[in-house]
Each structure stands twice: as C-alpha cells, then as structure tokens.
Image (cartoon, grey):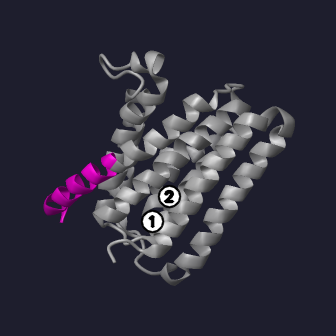
Amino acid sequence: MLIEVKSLVIATISIVSCLAFLVFITASWEQVGWLGLWVYAGVMIAIFGSWILLVGRRNIGKNLLETSDFAIIALFAALLMVVDAGSMFAPGLSILWFIAPSLAGPLLSYLPMGIVLGAALKLSPKPGSAFTLFFVYSGIIAQVLFFNPVWIPRSLLCALGLEAYYLSSKRGTTSSLVIMGVMFGMLVPSSAAIFQIYSWGYWQPLFTTLPAAILSGITMAIGAFLGSRLGERAKTITY
C-alpha cells in the first residue's frame, strides 16, 4: 500500500479529537474554565505521546539524525518563521484577514507552511525530523526561558502530533505527506483557536474557526504535495 493503515488511524484520531475539542471548548469554555484547556492539552499530548511510544519503539536508537539533517531542519524552521510572519504582510493580500479571515489563514499561512513542511520532510525522512522541526520553529525553548507557560503545551502537542503521524507513515512519500497536510493543517489552527481563548481572551465563533480549520487542512495538503515535489528535485542538488 502507498499509505500505511496506522498513519490513517492516527490522522483520523487527531482530526476527530481536535475538531471535537474545538467545538466543545468554543461552546463551553466559560463553564469549564481553565480545566478545559488543561484537559484538552493533556488528552492530546497523551494520545500522541503514547502513539509514538507504541509505534516508534522499533526506531529508537536507529537511523539517528545526522549533521546534515539538523542543517536541513534549521533551514526549514527559519523558512517556517518567514511564512508565519510574512502571511500577515503579503502584498495586496493582507486585506483577506479583514474581509475573509476564514480564507486568509488557509491561503496565506497554511498553504506555504505545507510547502515548507513537505519539502523538509522529503529531504530528511528520519524518525525525529518532524518533531525537531516543529520544536525549533515553535520557539518552545524561548517559551521555557522567558516563561510563557500557557503556550508550551500547545507547541508540545503540535510537535508530538506531527511526529506521531510521521513515524506511522511511509516517510518521505508524497501520498503520506499529503495526508499529513490534512491532519496537521487542522490540528494547528484548531489548537491555536483554543489557546487564544484562554491566553488572549480572544473568543471566536465556530462559523469562523471551524471552516478555517477544515480549509487549512485542505490547503496544507496541497502545499505538502507541492513541497514534496520540490524536495524531490532538491535531492538531486543536495545528495
């Protein structure tokens, strides 16, 4: 098979869980309070962490990341930061954030993010690459050093979620990267919407956040496909 069944299982679990929590917390955050956030983060981290231990135990100590892998990860983590910042200032398109916010994120942020992730994981298809890439990009080290505790669990669950899927998939294949885009493209914006409620007091209605999360999954899948193709071409230069 071109796609591992276990990768489809964890992708389905992730999509259903993140969208269900988005709906529940959006509707009930005032009633459940901060407990809702910690339950959400704890459940998602437990799911992804347990899956990594279950699926990745055979890979522990094997096919370790090398200097070239860390160089690739550093480069593409920097590109992810450019995508993150640049999506807010895209010439002529930044108006989308005001007139169509549910469309702006998927097009300006998650489409190029999918391209970068797809290319990076095509070039470094090893256990640990996905986690390390998002770990570096998310700034979790800075969050620890400058003590931003609310956002630390979100960075951790996203990094674990990306690695949990990637370990389960046929790493480096275009088909697996496209499914990764669907799964991760929904996990990232839904988790962001949930954490923004608690950390910023920025509550958004479901008719804004839910379509945006679904569209982000679609656009990141497209981006991952394009990134995989770019990564395949880049291999002829780097190797």
Question: Residue 162 — which label?
Answer: 2
Q: Residue furthest bottom?
A: 58
Of 15 and 80, the residue lying toward us? 15
Relative depth, front residue between 19 and 115: 19
Pointer 1 residue: 166
**Residue 10 in the figure: left or right of residue 90:** right
Left or right: where 73 falls relative to 238: right
Q: Position of residue 228 (x, y in %)?
A: 27, 56
User: Can residue 124 be seen from the camera position used here?
Assistant: no
Residue contact between numbered discs 2 and 1, judged by CB atoms under 8 Å: yes
Q: Secondary structure at mark 2?
A: helix
What amino acid is at disc 2?
Leu
Q: Residue at x 48, y 80 (%)?
A: 59
User: Residue 189: x and y, percent?
Assistant: 54, 40
- In the rendered image, the vertical position of residue 107 relative to residue 220, given as above or below: above
The magenta-colored residue range is: 222-239
Residue at position x 55%, y 54% from top? 15
Q: What secondary structure is found at the residue carrying circle 1?
A: helix
